[in-house]
Image (cartoon, grey):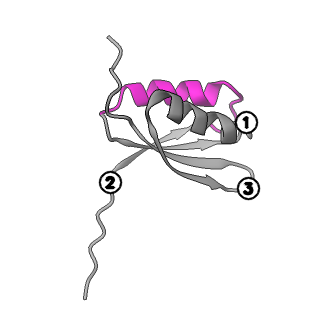
Amino acid sequence: MTQETSQEPELILDVMGQQCPLPVLRTRKRLLNLDPGTLLRVFVTDPVSRIDMPHFCIETGHELIDTRDRGTWIEFLIRRGTDIARPD
């Protein structure tokens, strides 16, 4: 029996080496230009992002799907919210 794996396409945002507030600001800017429901995987080294990124997602209507602590860096998987207007 074969098992089908259907993965949604993801985009990557690497903000490693950048300090607060840049990881969240760059994530926000990238998400605003994506279609609703698009997945964005974000790589950060700033430890403050463990607090900031979940708070940002709650406040802005994006879905934080997964957070993985990779030791010296953190990986977030975020789904762009559906009720967020794109900038003009």
**Res 32 → quadrant:** top left
Q: Is residue 4 left or right of residue 54?
A: left
Residue indicated by mark 1: 48
| Above or below: residue 88 compared with residue 42 | above
Q: Is residue 61 magenta?
A: no
The answer to whether the residue labelled 1 contacts the one labelled 3, judged by CB atoms less than 8 Å apart, is no
Q: Which residues are magenta?
A: 15-35
Most foreground residue, 39 or 57: 57
Total of numbered circles in the picture?
Answer: 3
**What is the C-alpha distance between the residues marked 1 and 3?**
14 Å
**What is the C-alpha distance between the residues marked 1 and 2?**
28 Å
**Res 30 → quadrant:** top left
Disc 1 or disc 2, which is closer to the eye?
A: 1
Disc number for residue 8: 2
Instruction: Return the disc, 1 or 2, that comes first in the chain's sequence.
Output: 2
Most foreground residue, 17 or 69: 69
Instruction: Return the disc, 2 or 3, that comes first in the chain's sequence.
Output: 2
